[in-house]
Amino acid sequence: MPDTTEQRPYHHGNLRVELLHAAERSLRAHGAEQLSLRDLAREIGVSHAAPRRHFADRRALLDALAESGFVRLGARLRAAVDEIDDEEDLPARLYAFASAYVRFATENVALTGLMNASKHRPGATAVAEAAAAAFGQISDLIEEGQARGELEEGDPEGIGLVIYATVLGITSMVNSGMIEPGRLEGLVDTAVTQFLRGARPTEPR
Amino acid sequence: MPDTTEQRPYHHGNLRVELLHAAERSLRAHGAEQLSLRDLAREIGVSHAAPRRHFADRRALLDALAESGFVRLGARLRAAVDEIDDEEDLPARLYAFASAYVRFATENVALTGLMNASKHRPGATAVAEAAAAAFGQISDLIEEGQARGELEEGDPEGIGLVIYATVLGITSMVNSGMIEPGRLEGLVDTAVTQFLRGARPTEPR
DNA sequence: CCCGAGAGTAGACATTGACAACATTGTTGT
DNA sequence: ACAACAATGTTGTCAATGTCTACTCTCGGG
């Protein structure tokens, strides 16, 4: 375990990951706007130019944060869905998915904002890929539901995107203070039930 | 009409609004991150400290931009809905609402990002109010639909928020580059139809 | 064993937001 | 008419920041 009391050798040896950790703490505490490379360097105890060896740019650091966020979000979404034992209980799985997203987004407000805001300029495919992997899961849920006849036919990816967008929008509004956090649960609930009602086959049976 | 070739009198006379205009141009051209008060001052031709007389803070300028954005958005949403002559054609009005939002958001990418990102810290009620006025309209649509029996009963504001969140989420994903702009129209379409299918009364008389 | 690449350091520079002290103008009360 | 006075702009200054360049340290492989 690295100790801060330890006499730092000339080479830190673990700077990149520690920078990411410190950056995430700062992000949580003061937001992306306030995040300063020099601050992180100070906090870790290296010179102000050291971060540049690992991140070409302030933006590169933020992108790395966003990417890491998407990876973790994807993992948590997958875990939440898999936690529903009954593989055929689509409503439960959908609700688990939505709840997991909401929990992540409200527990990581600034991070989520960063993830949604970071415009992926040409070439920065890493972030986009991580994001796609995160919400791609829901397409699978839709497809399975359609295969079992529980859902109306239709482009599964499109439908999945719409659901994802709904949850994203709700948490975005809560996180930006447009609506009170107390309404979150209720909104997610009506969103999911609304979708299920609208997506069931026209001729039941 | 004010000319830039004119000898500027000591008092500019219209600095506040011209600052906002210049700020919006800069926002559109380089994003909120890059917006610099000194730049705006230079562009307008006043001293670097002049903006401070009208905006206490860089953040105050951005907040004003966001508020103005919400006001204009609200107007365009209202106009779009009112443009549908048949007051009882709920689907058409919903679609008009969604389309208008999408158009605004894709025509004003950075502005929309700013509006959604600006965390309204305690006391900054102006932005929140403008936002509420913008999306509050949809609750009215829902209520009318319910009154005519075209929609299932339920908290109209909650339902309205869910729709708004869906459209917001879709455009957010497009604007952040997560999905290609070409899919926008189709996604909005499925979102609206999905909602309408799910919201119709259970026993259609 | 040495030497070169990777990793950290030190110094410099332009830019920025914020602040203070001062200048100019328009307004208002008398 | 005119003297305060409040708005509005200006100049000067300061600390902080991102980024760049040149230098230093350390370690592992020929």
Image: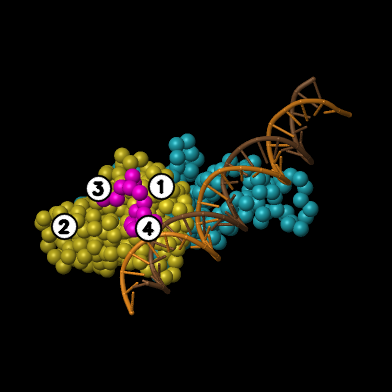
Chain colours: A yellow, B cyan, C brown, D orange
Residue at image location 70% in from the left, 53% down from the top: B45
Type of the residue with mark 4: His
For the residues bearing labels 3 and 2, Cβ distance under 8 angstroms: no
Q: CA distance from mark 1 to mark 3?
A: 42 Å
Q: Secondary structure at mark 3?
A: helix
Which residue position holds label 4? A11
**In this figure, what is the number of numbered marks?**
4
Residue at image location 21% in from the left, 58% down from the top: A78
Which residue position holds label 2? A82
Which residue position holds label 1? A43
Location of residue A158 in the rendering, given as x and y in whole percent from the top left corner: 30, 65
Q: CA distance from mark 4 to mark 1?
A: 16 Å
Type of the residue with mark 3: Asp
The numbered mark 2 sits on a residue in which chain?
A
- How crowded pointer 1 is (Cα within 10 Å; few <14, some 14-19, many 20+) is rated as few
Q: Secondary structure at mark 2?
A: helix
Residue C21 found in image quarter: top right
For the residues bearing labels 2 and 4, Cβ distance under 8 angstroms: no
Span of residues in magenta = A1-18
Type of the residue with mark 1: Glu
Q: Nearer the viewer, residue A135 or D10?
A: D10
Location of residue B170 in the rendering, given as x and y in whole percent from the top left corner: 37, 59
Type of the residue with mark 2: Asp
Q: Are marks 4 and 1 on the same chain?
A: yes
Q: Is residue A122 above or below residue B122?
A: below
Q: Secondary structure at mark 4?
A: loop
